[in-house]
Amino acid sequence: MFSVSGMRDFTLFSLPHIVTLIIFFITCCIMVFFRKKLRSYQSNIKWTLFSILIVCELSLHVWLILTKEWEVGDLPLQVCSLSTFLALYLFLKTSQKGFNLLFFIGLLPAILAMVTPDLIYQFPHFRFIRYFLQHAAIPISVLYFILFEDYRVPRKSILFSFITLNIIAVPIFFLNHLLGTNFFFLASPSETKTLLSYFGSGIMYYINLEIVGLIVFFITYIPMGILQKVENKSVRGE
């Protein structure tokens, strides 16, 4: 379960992968459809998610260090780590701007990362469990903030959050060149087969990253826009 060389046979859409995705989507549905009944457990949900995110982030580095696999490319500077730190911050302190960015980088991107994971270890390896736990906890945290803490995202935040992410990506880009790393996957696609594998190479890779990133932001906002329209109509109806 904790071996470096064992269980390195992850297969896309294998039974463990599909079951994991199903469990994730069922959990999301339960949160949405039973949100009123779950309000009495809000504190439990909040601190459970908080704990999962911290344990997942820290345990990875502990495992890497103990197995002597840790290297500079394992610094927590990927988008999922940024989403994790944003979620942890929001569990402790209210921040509308922080949530706006988390909403766009922590909802659909994390789900896509579970559909085509950058992973080589199969269930029940520690890396498999940690990867899916963390990537599931991020969008579930976003749902928590929407359902239980009443965060909403204005339409203008689509462009603002996209620009903010690009500003963050600039020093990451140069850090990759300095350290020979691949944070934010700005140097190249992931080593395993993911959606990024179809983005091409060279300048086209970055152009496709920008185009697809902006499209993802717009798609992510659609349910939020619908939710706010429904709520506004309900308020006017009263």
Image (cartoon, grey):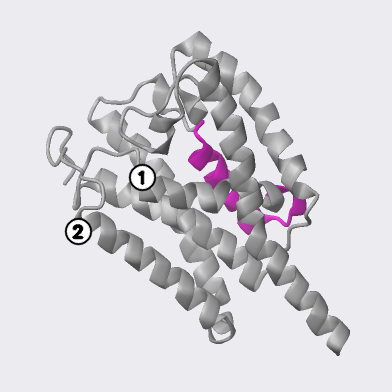
Total numbered labels placed on residues in the image? 2
Taking the image as drawn, is residue 151 in sight?
Answer: no
The quarter of the picture where the C terminus appears is bottom right
Return the mark for residue 43.
Answer: none
* Residue 166 position by quadrant: top right
Query: Relative to residue 150, is residue 115 drawn left or right?
Result: left
**Relative to 38, does residue 175 appear above or below in the rendering?**
above
Mark closer to the chain start, 1 or 2:
2
Q: Nearer the viewer, residue 214 or 191?
A: 214
Q: Is residue 90 magenta?
A: yes
Q: CA distance from mark 1 to mark 2?
A: 14 Å
* Residue 236 position by quadrant: bottom right
> Residue 39: image x %, image y %?
58, 81
Task: Identify the main secondary structure in magenta.
Answer: helix
Q: Is residue 229 magenta?
A: no
Q: Which residues are magenta?
A: 77-98
Q: Residues within 10 Å of mark 2 (few under 14, many from 20)?
A: few
Identify the residue at horizontal 45%, vertical 24% (top origin): 200
Q: Which residue is mark 2?
A: 15
Return the mark for residue 116.
Answer: 1
Dot 1 amino acid type: Thr
Q: Residues within 10 Å of mark 1 (few under 14, many from 20)?
A: some
> Residue 69: image x %, image y %?
27, 26
* Residue 181 position by quadrant: top left
**Relative to 197, does residue 83 appear above or below in the rendering?**
below
Identify the residue at horizontal 25%, vertical 25% (top origin): 68
**Relative to 35, does residue 139 appear above or below in the rendering?**
above
> Residue 109: image x %, image y %?
51, 46
